[in-house]
Image (cartoon, coloured by chain):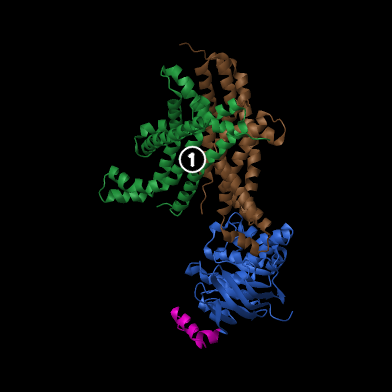
Chain colours: A brown, B green, C blue
Amino acid sequence: MNFDWTVIWRNAPSLAEGTLLTVVLTTLTMAIAIPGGIVLALMRLSPIRAVSAASAGFVEFFRNLPLILVVYWAYYVMPVAFDVQFSAFTTGLAALAFNVSAYNSETFRAGIQSIRKGQVEAALALGMSRAQAVREVVLPQAVPRVLPVLASTWVSLFKDTSLVSVIAVGELAYTAMRIRSQTFRVLEMLTAMAAIYWALGYPQAKLVDWLHRKFRVME
Amino acid sequence: MDLDFTPLIESRQYLLEGLELTIVLSLATVAASLALGGAVGLARCYGPSSLRWFLVLYIDSMRAVPVLVVLVWTYFAFPILSGISLPPFWAALVALTLHIAAYVAEIVRAGITSVRPGQLRAALAIGMSRREAVVEIILPQAIIRMLPAFGSILSITIKDTAIAAVIAVPEYMKQSETVAGQSFHPIEVFSVAAIVYFLILFPVTRLVDMLYARVAHLGRS
Amino acid sequence: MTGPILSYCAVRKLFGQFVALDGVSFEIARGEVVCLIGPSGSGKSTLLRCTNGLETIDGGEIRFDGVPLPSNDAGARQIRQRMGMVFQNFELFPHKRVIDNVAIGPRIVLRMKDGLAVRRAEALLDKVGLSEKAGSYPANLSGGQQQRVAIARALAMEPELMLFDEPTSALDPETIGEVLNVMKRLADEGMTMLVVTHEMTFARRVANRVIVFERGTIVEDGPPTQIFETPRVERTRDFLSHLGWAG
């Protein structure tokens, strides 16, 4: 049983690229899923039944499916549905973005609903429009409540990007496993993969804890 | 787009066996995670402080590393290191349990710390031993608060079993993948898989929502 | 500017099956201070909330300055700018400082320039006796102080009519007085006020008129001397004696 740990060092550039793609994928997904979540939350709170139901349906759909299945499904359905050949990256991004938007919408909805009704009434009583009331009174109070949860979602998303490796997107998990297949250095590469995720994920998890402490809502 | 569902009908036995395994793996994982996670959570709250740093390291590490990585490492790397080779199902069970038990431990810790400290003091004041106080007074109150989160654990576990497909555990996701690849009808196969998972998970998430609503009125006890 | 500022004509309001307001009719003239009293659930607060459109009515009509309340959003907003409302739970905006709470109406709704809005806010804070708290956040103020800021916030819009929904019910006894004093000064200055309250002393001393509600209808309507000393209706007497009001 001989190990060759230098294989990690020799493939460092590839691993770095993979890691970078993981970060890019996470960032892009959140960039889409935050506005996406807000839109879905506002739709859910709309007095128009059809709009509210559509949003609720979308959210339920993604809450109740394994993400890996969504990734596969998107990979096969998207080209047929849109008659366009998407890259694996785009497919993976779409699957992740839809999934996280659904979770974010619940976060935003809870945040918005946690604001007392009287706050909105006081704003309306001054003559503000609903939009003004939301902008001036609801959102500024909802954001500190929502931020720690969004941070947790970010960390989960960072880990979930590993799932798009199954459709050959070159993020960290795919890259590490590819190098493993090429070099047959199984223990070394898989341990390196775990170590890199750990090194990136651990501080993020600690940051989330700090955010939760800092923004602990005092009523 | 013309759909052909016959491959699904032809492979239904194969797929059903996969579904069965999904359920077995999920339930086994939940049971094992509750046991391990419960033990770790209790040890964190009431165990020797010399042990705490290790438990915290374990819990935070599982928060940092993806399930996929734990699964793959357990199945491919662990045997090389230890000489023990695990069949796919058992590797998945071990990996998923280790990963999910960390979440259970956090739920247990949160549940226990949500019970007012005065409750413990009051119990000790009437002469209960520490162990009696925890078992009779703290845990019952804590467990009620933990129930909705435990429901989420079931939901998360079922979803995570689908990832075990990458280490060739013949659960429902893997079987679907195989049928899709062989029949060249991935859309039909995966669409049905989506419906099946939805039908399994929807009642669970509904139950969890109901439980959360029921315990919502309980603040700090 | 003649005619009543507010007139209610057979106003009905339902919450599902429950009849909150059952044919309420009366008028308020400019400069009048009217107190609505009555048991909980009798419809007093509901009437107030229908007046500025926070609730819609299911029957009858409410006229403000001779014009029926508009049913469209933009119209309702216009009307609300002319009425001020003070809530039982103050509802100050916790994420804004006191001065910004008072200035927010002029700033956002009247689109006033910052400097002007702040000057108006400072003057009003001075009027309610809280100039030194301008830079503080609501959480650092007592209940009575918060309510006085809430009054200043409503006044910043220079309303023609002030609605008070149990303004002192959530206050400690020690701080009730400071809020009632501000309200009395407002009344003395000629503000038209519609006040839902349990503070009988205030009603007795400051109101021009007291209207007694019970189960969504008006039981009695008259000057305080009548209501408190020589009520004409049995139910009024019952309600007051229930409160231990010895006159």
Overall secondary structure of the magenta section: helix
Determine whether the residue tagged by mark 1 lies in a helix, strand or loop.
helix
Does A79 sit above or below residue A52?
above
In the rendered structure, does residue A41 fall within the stretch colored magenta?
A: no
Locate residue B155 relative to residue B1 in the image: left or right: left
Q: Position of residue A48 (x, y in %)?
A: 65, 56
Residue at label 1?
Answer: B155
Residue A23, located in which quarter of the rendered image? top right
- Quadrant of residue C107 in the image? bottom right
- Give the residue at x 68% y 67%: C80
Q: Which residue is painted at 53% across and 30% down in the image?
A: B11
Q: Answer yes or no: is residue C226 visible.
A: yes
Q: Nearer the viewer, residue B156 or C5?
A: B156
Can residue B67 be seen from the camera position used here? no
Chain letter of the residue carrying label 1: B
Callout 1: 10 Å neighbours few (<14), some, many (20+)? many
Region in magenta = C224-246
